[in-house]
Amino acid sequence: MIKILSKLFGGFFRRKDNIKIGFYGPPNAGKTSLANLLCKDWTGEELGSVSDIPHETREVQFKEKVEIEHKGKKLMLKLIDTPGIATKIDYEDFLHHGVPKQEAKKRAKEATQGIIEAIKWLDDMDAVIVVLDASENPYSQVNITIIGNLLARKIPVLIVANKIDLKKADAKKIEAAFPEYNVVGISAKKALNMDEFYTALFKLTKKI
């Protein structure tokens, strides 16, 4: 009887509704694409717009009460998509993508403010999904800064090696760069390897 009560109450107190999961990473790694995929699959609505232009997401956006089910288990999540983290934002980067000068300066200012906002939101995160481009060098200053910050805050982390559909993609390099974390390779654009992603996501929430 004691064991039954312990199990029941233990499960009750451990259960947490609307677990806050943040998507972090450098610009154009696929954070919003992954957040959109989850939201579309489980709520029928996307979270934000995506573009080939860096810093398309320039402010924190979120969706409440996204219920995900996988292998008979359920999670209620609050998904928070954040602007791409960068050490420097130059308005000229937008000019290369055909953005008019005035609009480019406006976007650069918004993106800078968005990064500050994203860092502040870390204080409210239960766990973080770091989305990295598997076709890029993982040993960048931005990636190391992001991971180091999360490690210092002791926030549970899952690293997603996105864009495995690309020829240059190598998820093993990301695993080698950050061996202390679980890394799962996916393609958010083509919804590849999402079963492994969901398994890793449920495992991540157990650390909260």
Image (cartoon, rainbow, N blue to C red):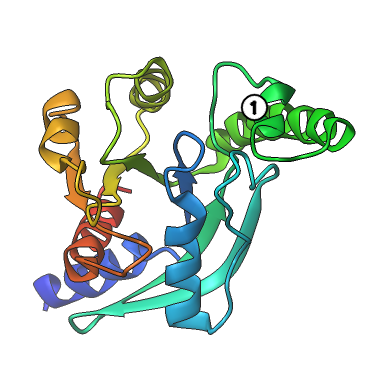
Q: Which residue appears at 51% of the width and 59% of the height?
A: 79
Any part of residue 111 in sight: yes
The percent position of residue 181, horizontal first and vertical second, equals: 19, 35
Q: In this view, does 141 lie to the left or right of 179?
A: right
Name the quadrant containing residue 55: top right
The percent position of residue 23, horizontal first and vertical second, equals: 46, 47
Query: Of all residues shown, which one is farthest toward the right?
Result: 102
Frontmost residue, 42 versus 189: 189
Q: Which residue appears at 47% of the width and 59% of the height?
A: 33
- Residue carrying label 1: 93
The percent position of residue 39, horizontal first and vertical second, equals: 50, 72
- Above/below status of 35 relative to 143: below
Name the quadrant containing residue 144: top left
- Above/below status of 14 relative to 168: below
Instruction: Tell how many labels.
Output: 1
The percent position of residue 5, horizontal first and vertical second, equals: 20, 74
Q: Which residue appears at 25% of the width and 66% of the height?
A: 198
Frontmost residue, 96 versus 7: 96
Circle 1 Cα neighbour tier, 10 Å, few/some/many (<14 / 14–19 / ≥20): some
Frontmost residue, 93 versus 25: 93
- SS for dot 1: helix
- Above/below status of 55 relative to 62: above
Q: Which residue appears at 31% of the width and 80% of the height?
A: 69
Any part of residue 19 in sight: no
Name the quadrant containing residue 45: bottom right
Q: What residue type is labelled 1?
A: Asp
The image quadrant where one finds the N terminus is bottom left
Q: In this view, does 208 lie to the left or right of 119?
A: left
